[in-house]
Amino acid sequence: MIAEHSAIVARGMGVRRGGRWLLRPVTFGVPEGVVGVAGPPGVGKSTLLATFATLRRPHTGALNILGHDTAHAAGVRAARARIGYLPGRLSRKQNMTAGEFVSYAAYYQRAGASAARDVIARLDLAEAAGTELSLLPPDVRLRAGVAAACVHSPDLVLLDDPFAELCAPGAGAEAGGGAAAMAELIPVLRSLAPTVVVTADAAGTLTGWCDLLLGLSRGRLTELPARSAARVPADRAAGRRVPHPRDARAPAAVREPGRRRAARPVLAQLTRFRMPRAPAGSGAGV
């Protein structure tokens, strides 16, 4: 089954590049909340995110984004109007300030100048708005990229390895870099849209703050522990649930056509928020 409020619904969808499967044909749904996708470089995370952004077509199967069928041009246009996409390795455009970058994105998205001003204030970029992107520290440059991606208030935000620069060796030595900058940015990323999908090379970068964490390897998605062993008891000891601006709904199980159930379920009962678990033997697994 696929959750009623899945932002992304894939049915038998497969993604290929260079003659190999990056994602073997599979059926799944991505729910509301923050969903992390981890995997080593070259495994296909960026290609998968570009597919969700409708910039690439699946090799096989169907893909619905926010209720729109991306097999048709009208569905692609409607979905893109509600997607905020930040590709990896944000280009440091020469002679373009952070404010100009966000304003250009607002113009492209037909959001207006007021929307650009609002998102600049929301992401605390007022002081950096007049500075060239190439001169900004990594965390502030990331905020500028996120502001540009979200200037039109999207319902689905896709962030491709946003912490790459902050996690790079020596990043902690830069002003605002490293773990402290990530800790400040995480609440911002969680509040961007009803559904946020974020990727990283290492699962540890996403562990502890994503509602759902998936691993991509050898063309298959598997569920990973979303919270570290140390983090969960701390939250429970404090008597609070993990905070999130919206209640997340459970996604569907993932099935690969023609495959038998494996000993370990893959994306079966992915989250434990409000939806009941699928009964045993229902096919909710690979």
Image: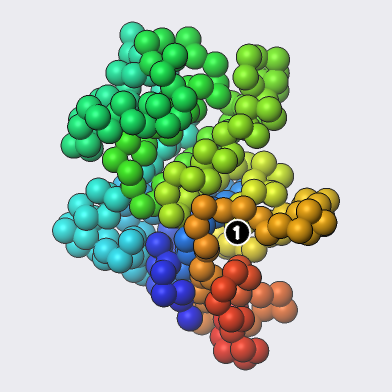
Q: Residue at x 62, y 89 (%)?
A: 279
Can residue 220 be seen by looking at this rendering? yes
Query: The C terminus is located in which quarter?
Result: bottom right
Q: Quadrant of residue 242?
A: bottom right
**Does residue 275 sit above or below 107 in this rendering?**
below
Q: Residue at x 47, y 42 (%)?
A: 159
Outermost residue, front side: 239
Label 1: how many residues lie within 10 Å, few (<14), some (14-19) or many (20+)?
Answer: many
Q: Out of 183 and 35, give the one closest to the viewer.
A: 183
Q: Residue at x 32, y 56 (%)?
A: 57
For disc 1, the marked residue is 212
Residue 275 is situated, as x and y percent measured from the top left of the image, at: 55, 77
**Does residue 231 sit above or below 254 in this rendering?**
above
Tell me if 150 is positioned left or right of 46 in this view.
Answer: left
Residue 232 is situated, as x and y percent measured from the top left of the image, at: 77, 56
Q: Residue at x 50, y 57 (%)?
A: 246
| Number of numbered discs | 1
Which colouring convention does the figure follow? rainbow
Tell me if 171 is positioned left or right of 150 in this view.
Answer: right
**Does residue 218 sit above or below 160 in this rendering?**
below
Can residue 168 be seen by looking at this rendering? no
Tell me if 48 is positioned left or right of 83 in this view.
Answer: right
Q: Out of 85 and 114, give the one closest to the viewer.
A: 114
Tell me if 210 is positioned left or right of 225 in this view.
Answer: left
Q: Quadrant of residue 273?
A: bottom right
Residue 222 is situated, as x and y percent measured from the top left of the image, at: 63, 63
Residue 250 is situated, as x and y percent measured from the top left of the image, at: 54, 70
Q: Please, what secondary structure does the residue beneath circle 1 have?
A: strand
Q: Amino acid at mark 1?
A: Leu
Q: Out of 241 and 81, give the one closest to the viewer.
A: 241
